[in-house]
Amino acid sequence: MNDNFRRLSVMSWNVRGLGDSEKCDVVRDAIASAAPSVCCLQETKLHDITTKKARTFLPPALAASHHFLGASGTRGGILTAWNPNLFNMDSFIARKHTLTTVLASTMMDLRLTITNVYAPADHRDTHLFLDGLRELLPHIHGPWLLAGDFNLIRCAEEKNTSASSSPHIAAFNQVIHDLCISELPFLDCSFTWSNMRAVPTLARLDRMFVNNAQCIAFPQTSLSSLVRQTSDHTPIIVHMSTQIPKSTLFRFENAWLHNNLFLPTVLPAWHEAPATHDAAGNLAGCLKYTRAAAKVWARHNRAPPTLIPNCKFLVLFDTLEEDRVLSVLERQVRSMCHERLCLAIKERAAVWGQRGKRRAVREGDSNTAFFHAHATQRLRRNAIRGIEVNGLMITSHQHIVAALTTYYKSMLGTTSPGPGTSMLMHAQEPPPG
């Protein structure tokens, strides 16, 4: 993937029918306000969707490029629409309860597979639906996002009543395990469906799942809800970004120890710190000088992102050896590439192993994806996506840092926060199960 910063968003919504023209206007305005890159709609209740009809409920940016699965009678109907400036459809798989589209990005080297799900409300067909999800796995290559109305819960707490089916819960969680996917946690709500009665029944039926490849491609991914202007389902939207805000804190990287030049370059700084009469001061000085030397070394020895692909390309001398004898220089280049590739793989595995806090797994190239995915899950659980200051929600990373800094500075030297300041942090919780 292109190393440049990219941001995409995918919206999912069970609209409960698009036959009414006034409702179509409301749906179109809601989607236009969210401005998603891709929009997944369920229960359209439409047998056929022409471009003219699509323009009644989709904004202009999405109406021209869409694919749909027609309704069966008055039930079902799935539509996936995308911005043609961002994606082109490469292929699709249509099943009874799912519509899977493979979208090729027009801006970067990315093929994103999106499965739009509308599960049966009649639980007699639940096992057929879950088996259909399993059958999709062999056809998935690269980042995968499953979005839609699953009509199932994963635990009893996802419904505000005691009525739940343990066998269906167990079967649903087993399929999630078999597909090797992770559910994106909500930032701002616990339920996505309501029967809209005086004493409502609430449940979490609308979800989004991602696979490990998506975690690696978009480490900064968050899921939130939108205003429910119509329908009894809450529209949800996922924001996916390739950019991770960098901390100003110093972090010692275990990967540096794999480089033979690190210790000889950095250790002399330990002895260069000026001596003091305080043992703690001596230790702090040595650590400070060593930290500065490590930061300088890391800045000058950072491997370019093309290092591993270039090394793998030059190792192709192995195939030339089948046709002719390699020259002395070619053998030397191949040997150097093998050594540098081995070192780069160890360094990369060490970096993501440290961030993923998984120490019981042997380092190696085949484990790097696991380290990376686990570190991404930790990031999502620990990240503060937004804070509320005096009734105003702030989501920008820079503005969050400024607000937190101002808030805690106002607390220094006092026993309580200053008057007129209130703050509520919205942090992610790990998904159930």
Image (cartoon, helix red, strand yellow):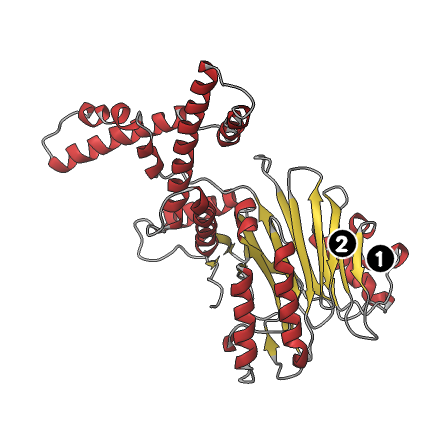
Q: Quadrant of residue 158?
A: bottom right
Q: Residue at x 50, y 76 (%)?
A: 157
Left or right: residue 266 versus residue 400 is left
Whole-percent x and y of residue 428?
48, 59
Where residue 277 sits, quadrant-wise, is: top left
Q: Quadrant of residue 322?
A: top right
Comparing 367 with 15, the one in front is 367
> Which disc number belongs to residue 81?
2
Q: Residue furthest left?
A: 277
Determine contact: label 2, label 1, CB under 8 Å: yes
Q: Secondary structure at mark 1?
A: helix
Query: Which amino acid type is marked by label 1?
Result: Ala
Tell me if residue 366 comes above or below residue 237 in the rendering. Answer: above
Q: Amino acid at mark 2?
A: Ala
Count neighbours of disc 2 (C-alpha within 10 A) and say few if under 14, some if 14 to 19, many if 20 or more.
many
Q: Position of residue 371 (x, y in %)?
A: 43, 48
Label 2's element? Answer: strand
Give the distance between the C-alpha atoms of the residues marked 2 and 1, in whole angstroms: 9 Å
Taking the spot 48% from the left edge, 42% from the top edge, the residue there is 245
User: Which residue in the protein does label 1 denote?
Assistant: 54
Classed neighbour count for the residue bearing mark 1: other residues with Cα under 10 Å, few (<14), some (14–19), many (≥20): many
Q: Quadrant of the N terminus?
A: top right
Relative to the observer, which residue lies in front, 112 or 385? Answer: 112
